[in-house]
Image (cartoon, helix red, strand yellow):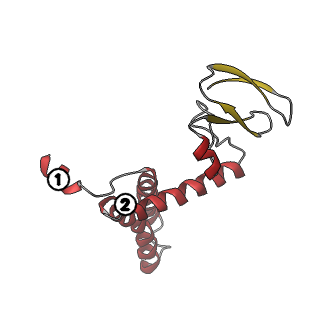
Amino acid sequence: MNWLRNFMYGRYGMDKLNFILLIIGVAINLLTSIIGRFLIWMMYGWVYTIIWLIGILPLVFALYRALSRNIHARQKELYRYQRFEQWVKRLFGRNTYGTNGRSSTVYTSGKEVKDRKNYKYFQCPSCRQKIRVPKGRGKIRIHCPKCGHDFEKKT
């Protein structure tokens, strides 16, 4: 097992995008093999080959990303995927703020990142207005200036 650890040292490894690519590739290849067996008389050989290659591409790309040493480029790809995923979730009305509903802290601008030492940013659960509150005050009641909704958060 030590040889694998030494081989993967300095490489990007697996992340959420690689996992999604692997699932897509396996699903396409599985469907191609199942449909190809039942509809072999309808599918021409070149159509089957093209669909099979489309299923192999995500697998090859996931392997390339996992073994890549260009970590910065892979992180940019992951960031673009996460932005696309958030866009799709917003399109279908799912809440994408925070992490699984545990936290509603949101940093979107450089000023907010600079202020994170002294202030914490929350979003109003009612109207999604960003509200800045001082850190270190314990559990406080926050009043939204936009809609007037009150909610409690730990700072």
Q: In the image, is 152 to the left or to the right of 38?
A: right
Q: Quadrant of residue 132?
A: top right
Question: Pointer 1: what residue?
Answer: 6
At horizontal 33% and vertical 62% (from top left) the residue drawn is 63
Residue 34 vs residue 82, the one in the foreground:
82
Task: Please tell me which residue lies in front, 45 or 29.
Answer: 29
Position in image of residue 100 (x %, y %): 57, 35
Disc 1 packing (10 Å; few <14; some 14–19; many ≥20)? few
From the viewer's perspective, tell me whether residue 68 is left or right of residue 51: left
Above or below for 138 versus 54:
above
User: Does residue 48 appear left or right of residue 100 in this picture?
Assistant: left
Near mark 2 (Cα within 10 A), the count class, few <14, some 14-19 or many ≥20, is: some
Earlier residue among tags 2 and 1: 1
Task: Give whichever of 123, 28 is nearer the camera.
Answer: 123
Q: Position of residue 73 (x, y in %)?
A: 42, 65
Task: Mark yes or no: residue 67 visible.
Answer: yes
Task: Residue at 64%, 41% (x, y): give it.
Answer: 97
Q: Which residue is mark 2?
A: 71
Q: Which mark is residue 104?
A: none
- Quadrant hosting residue 145: top right
- Decide: is 139 above or below 118: above
What secondary structure is found at the residue carrying circle 2?
helix
For the point 65% across and 53% down, which residue is it? 88
